[in-house]
Image (cartoon, rainbow, N blue to C red):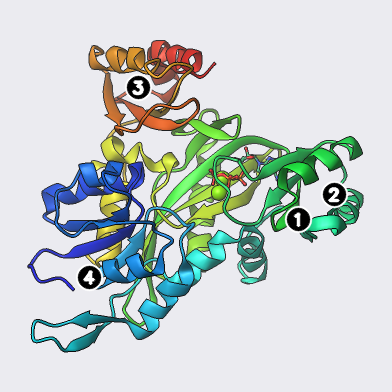
């Protein structure tokens, strides 16, 4: 329970998203207690005696965190929601100085209900199908686990044709739980790769681009929706299922489609529960229509650009404001005309990314600002260890892309 005048956010997870949350919290004099291993990236960025060492899946440690937080939030959705539900409903016992105990009940934002729903990608989309808001999603069917999986895959193929996507319902990130099934010949490999998990199959979405929109959701203490405010739509590029680049505004996408994406994103997030910042990943199809891929109940890689492009309320400041029920703007207007975010992924050697850091440190240009973010994580091939945001004060996204070519080339080269 907070005993200082600074509000305390208890955060499950201390990776780069928690680190950037701490960076946003520091000048606001907001305390962030991180539950993760000793010296996790987020803990390095914020000095407090409240950090808890341990796993964000461990109920006891989560209770310890809750006992000293004004609100609990997450930087990752793969957490233990049973204990979050119990804390939200029944609270935790906190020892007083006189030896007695008192029940303390910090709120959980976003709601444990939202986190639990989003954890299961199949149920998440069933919810969007049933919510009555006409949210377009890919057709999907649950797939049996174990020996019955093969028969289930045959049914999915008969329903969707090839290719289709076999996905783990839970626990996946960076496409690690996905398997593209192109023909019957892939069935064995698909079952071998994912067979032990709870699965579903999804109809292939023949998209021309992937878009994403971040949304700030606020509600009152009674759970009544106050506002859903959308950031600009961005174009996300995935390579080997990992997001590598983000373009704001999306290249060659009409403004009407970007507006439709923002509207759809707010509709999607309005059907969930609790306060916070959310990402809505979408597919843009050939006919200009949109389809929702999945939602993240937290800051997201596609929103990193907001640190410099929407500094009055970056996605991290937005998480802080939303979960603490502080005011949020009615509109989120970028301060620049264009922005590109490039992920720095660990290269073939532990120091491959340093070339990129060097290029970023020396880049000064009248119309392109360059911002380097390294997370102080050990470099492993393909691991997200930092990002670079480039912003154009007056350039179009195409002009900024041309200027950013040396960075884009080097990012691509390190990845190979
Ligand atoms: P994240 O790291 O975003 O949480 P994830 O592991 O949950 O990723 P998805 O978002 O389901 O995985 O899929 C990863 C990528 O695979 C998508 O961004 C898209 O490029 C591709 N993809 C997913 N579903 C489909 C589909 N039904 N049809 C075509 N491509 C798809
Ligand atoms: Mg996901
Ligand atoms: Mg995804």
Res. 372 visible in picture = yes
The residue shown at (22%, 80%) is 94
- Please say if 97 is above or below 395: below
Tag of residue 153: none
Tag of residue 395: 3
- Please say if 298 is above or below 84: above
The residue shown at (29%, 49%) is 316
Is the Cβ of the residue at disc 3 closer than 8 Å to that at disc 4? Answer: no
Locate residue 322 relative to residue 243 in the image: left or right. Answer: left
- Please say if 243 is above or below 154: above
Label 2 sits on a secondary structure element that is helix
Neighbor class of circle 4 (other Cα within 10 Å; few <14, some 14-19, many 20+) is many
Q: Quadrant of ligand 1?
A: top right
| Disc 3 from disc 4: Cα separation | 43 Å
The residue shown at (43%, 19%) is 401
Is the Cβ of the residue at disc 1 closer than 8 Å to that at disc 3? Answer: no
Residue 345 % position (x, y): 44, 26
Which of the 4 image quadrants contains residue 369?
top left
Label 3 sits on a secondary structure element that is loop
Disc 2 Cβ-to-ligand 1 distance below 8 Å: no
Is the Cβ of the residue at disc 2 closer than 8 Å to that at disc 1? Answer: yes
User: From the viewer's perspective, is the residue at label 3 or at label 4 nearer?
Assistant: 4
| Disc 3 from disc 2: Cα separation | 43 Å
The residue shown at (40%, 10%) is 406
Write down the residue under mark 1.
139
42 or 52: nearer the viewer: 52
| Disc 4 from disc 1: Cα separation | 41 Å
């Amino acid at each position: 329970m907070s005993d200082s005048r600074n509000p305390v956010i208890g955060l499950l997870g201390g990776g780069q998203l928690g680190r950037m949350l701490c960076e946003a919290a520091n000048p606001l004099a907001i305390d962030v207690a991180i539950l993760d291993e000793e010296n996790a990236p987020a803990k390095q960025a914020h000095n407090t005696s409240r950090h808890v060492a341990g796993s964000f899946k461990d109920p006891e440690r989560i209770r310890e965190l809750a006992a000293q937080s004004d609100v609990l939030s997450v930087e990752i959705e793969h957490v233990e929601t049973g204990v979050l539900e119990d804390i939200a409903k029944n609270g935790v016992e906190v020892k007083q100085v006189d030896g007695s105990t008192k029940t303390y009940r910090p709120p959980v934002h976003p709601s444990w209900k939202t986190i639990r729903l989003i954890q299961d990608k199949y149920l998440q989309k069933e919810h969007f199908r049933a919510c009555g808001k006409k949210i377009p999603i890919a057709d999907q069917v649950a797939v049996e686990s174990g020996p019955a999986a093969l028969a289930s895959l045959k049914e999915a193929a008969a329903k969707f044709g090839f290719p289709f996507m076999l996905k783990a319902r839970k626990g996946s990130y960076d496409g690690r739980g996905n398997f593209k099934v192109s023909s019957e010949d892939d069935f064995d490999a698909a079952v071998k790769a994912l067979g032990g998990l709870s699965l579903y199959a999804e109809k292939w979405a023949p998209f021309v681009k992937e878009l994403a929109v971040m949304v700030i959701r606020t509600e009152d203490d009674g759970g009544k929706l106050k506002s859903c405010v959308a950031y600009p739509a961005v174009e996300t590029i995935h390579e080997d299922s990992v997001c590598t680049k983000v373009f704001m505004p999306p290249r060659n996408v009409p403004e009407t489609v970007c507006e439709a994406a923002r509207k759809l994103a707010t509709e999607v997030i309005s059907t969930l529960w609790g306060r916070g910042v959310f990402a809505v990943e979408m597919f843009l199809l050939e006919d200009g229509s949109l389809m929702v891929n999945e939602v993240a109940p937290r800051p997201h890689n596609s929103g990193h650009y907001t640190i410099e492009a929407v500094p009055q309320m970056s996605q991290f400041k937005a998480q802080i404001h939303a979960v603490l029920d502080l005011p949020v703007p009615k509109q989120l207007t970028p301060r620049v005309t264009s922005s590109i975010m490039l992920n720095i992924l660990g290269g073939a050697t532990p120091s491959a990314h340093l070339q990129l850091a060097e290029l970023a440190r020396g880049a000064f240009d009248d119309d392109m600002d360059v911002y380097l973010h390294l997370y102080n994580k050990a470099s492993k091939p393909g691991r997200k260890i930092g990002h670079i945001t480039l912003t154009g004060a007056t350039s179009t996204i195409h002009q900024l892309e041309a200027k950013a070519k040396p960075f884009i080339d080097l990012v691509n080269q390190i990845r190979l």
